[in-house]
Amino acid sequence: MQASMYERLGAAAGIKAIVADVVEAHMNNPVIRARFLPYRDDPENLAAVSQQLCDFLCAGSGGPETYTGRDMVETHRGMNISAEEYMAETDDIMATLAAHGIDEATRNDVLAIAYGLKGEIMRV
Ligand code: HEM
C-alpha cells in the first residue's frame, strides 16, 4: 500500500518546514510579495497564519490534525487574487517541495489539489 500524502510530505515536522519555506519564498516573489511582506512586521499574526496553513495541509493530506481556520472562499474573499498571482503561489509551493526532496508523484498530487482549489481562491 502506498504511504499517505501526509507521510510522503514528512508528516507534521516535514509539513511545518515546508510551510515556513513557502512563506519565505512568497516574501521574495515579486509577483505576490506585497501581499505577504506586512506579516514580517507582525510576527504573531505570521505565526498564526503559518499554523493555520500547517493544519490545513496536515488535515488535508490525511494527518490527525484538525483545521480550525476559515474556508478558502471566506479566507481569500475580496483579495481579488489574479491568475498570475495564483500561478506564482503554485510555483513557490512546487519549488519548495522539490527543495525538500519530495518525490515527483507527490509533487504532482499537490499540484492537482492546488489547481482544484483555484475556483475557491482566485477572484472570489
Ligand atoms: C493553493 C492555494 C492556496 C491555499 C491552499 C491557501 C490557503 C490558505 C490558508 C489555509 C490560510 C489561513 C486561513 C485562516 O487563517 O483562517 C490562508 C491565508 C491567506 N492567504 Fe492563502 N491560500 C492559497 C493561495 C493564496 C494566494 C494565491 C494568495 C495571494 C497571492 C493568498 C493569500 C493569503 C493571505 C494574504 C492570507 C492571510 C489572510 C489573513 O491574514 O487573514 N493565498 N491561505
Image (cartoon, grey):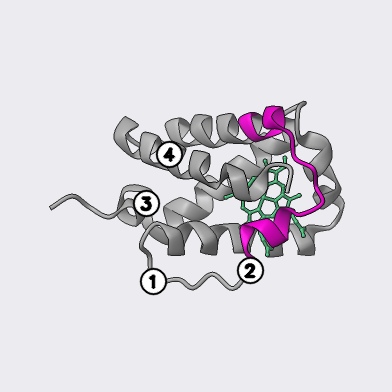
Front disc: 1 or 3: 1
Q: Which residue is mark 4?
A: 112
Earlier residue among tags 2 and 3: 3
The secondary element bearing badge 4 is classed as: helix
Q: Amino acid at mark 3?
A: Gly
Frontmost residue, 12 versus 85 = 85
Disc marking residue 64: 1
Frontmost residue, 75 versus 63 = 75
Earlier residue among tags 3 and 4: 3
Disc 2 C-beta below 8 A from ligand 1 = yes
Disc 1 C-beta below 8 A from ligand 1 = no
Frontmost residue, 69 versus 96 = 69
User: Whole-percent x and y of residue 69?
Assistant: 63, 68
Front disc: 4 or 1: 4
Question: Residues in magenta?
Answer: 70-87
Earlier residue among tags 2 and 1: 1
Mark 2 touching mark 3, by CB under 8 A? Answer: no
The secondary element bearing badge 3 is classed as: loop
Disc marking residue 10: 3
Q: Amino acid at mark 4?
A: Ala
Which residue is depicted at the point 18% across and 50% down?
A: 2
Give me the C-alpha separation between circle 1 and circle 3. 13 Å
Q: Residues within 10 Å of mark 3 (few under 14, many from 20)?
A: some
